[in-house]
Image (cartoon, grey):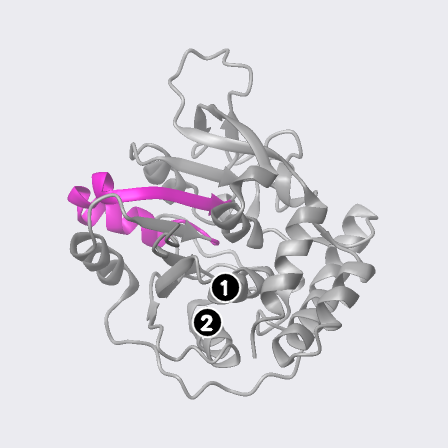
Amino acid sequence: MHPSPARPIIIDTDPGQDDAVAILLALASPELQVLGITTVAGNVPLALTTRNACILLELANRRDIPVHAGAIRPLVRPLVTAEHVHGKTGLDGPDLPEPTLAPAPEDAVAFIIRSLREQPPGSVTLCPLGPLTNIALALVRAPDIAPRIREIVLMGGGCFEGGNITPAAEFNIYVDPHAAEVVFRSGVPITMMPLDVTHQVLSTPARIAAIRAAGNRSGEVVAQMLEFFERFDVAKYQSDGGPLHDPCVIAYLLQPEIFQGRQVNIEIETRSELTMGMTVVDWWGVSGRPANARFMRQVDADAFFALLRERLARLP
């Protein structure tokens, strides 16, 4: 058997400690070809998310991958950020040097459009880990790219777990619900990693210790980030560790069999202040609206952390 060629992906992100772990997992996995990293305002403002993406590429010794800065704010609403979770830099925890890697001059939306036009149709997977602003802008600016996208695998939303920034809404969707509405109505195949799944993968002290035990610099940095990041969620959920949201997207590309879900209709609430950014998931098929996304509901957390530990150990 010949190994199958690496799957080309674009990671659209607002790092964030959990984004950082997702990016490092992708960089450590030869099955994936990271065409570029595009940044968006979300967990912290755009200047910091772009800086953080550059820091992570340097940590992994992957200066060959370009970083493209994208949307500085949501389509319609003012920007809401999450320094209360991620710290003032977005990557609080470890002591990381300022990057020497500079972002590419081309903006994120232009890069996404160009990449999808240049790569074979149906080959590129988009992996949004933050608000969907860049993805929506690309789809609006260049409708011809929609049928060329293999799949959008995103972290966002929730159903049975409720929200994490408001009672109804998950942070990424809440920050730019209008962008999410564009994406979910695009006709592109979507797989969604909601809070329902991410709240099952908890960075417990034992799991953090196992990542640290690899003895490499990347593992130590991840351990320090997770120790900082989890303090907020442990206090909030009274859990044994914080949920590791964004790496679920990359883990799904590597080991889809550890996730379970179903095709459903998902609509995004953009009109009500009370439920703004809610993902209205028709789990029971009561609306009659056609399915537009695969909503994941379960994950094998031990298999997830075994994968994460094994891959992060390969990094510098």
Quick one: quadrant of the C terminus? Answer: bottom right
State the residue at coordinates (60%, 51%): 245
Secondary element under disc 2, as helix, strand or loop, is helix
Residue 74 coordinates in the image, percent (x, y): 39, 53
Q: Which mark is residue 48?
A: none
- What's the residue at 39%, 84% (across, down)? 101
95 on left or right of 41: right
What amino acid type is highlighted by mark number 1?
Ile
Q: Quadrant of residue 212?
A: bottom right
Q: Is residue 135 magenta?
A: yes
The image quarter in which residue 211 lies: bottom right
Q: Is residue 39 visible?
A: yes
The answer to whether one can see residue 72 in this image is no
Query: Which residues lie in the magenta part?
Result: 129-155
The residue lying at 34 percent from left, 60 percent from top is 71
Residue 53's disc number: 2
Of the image marks 1 and 2, the number of the one nearer the N terminus: 1
* Label 1 with label 2: CB-CB less than 8 Å: yes
- Which residue lies under the disc numbered 1? 23
Where residue 41 sits in the image (x, y, percent)? 44, 62
How many angstroms separate mark 1 from mark 2 (CA)? 8 Å
Occupied quadrant, residue 265? top left
Q: Nearer the viewer, residue 248 or 176?
A: 248
In the image, is residue 300 above or below residue 241?
above
Tag 2: residue type? Ala
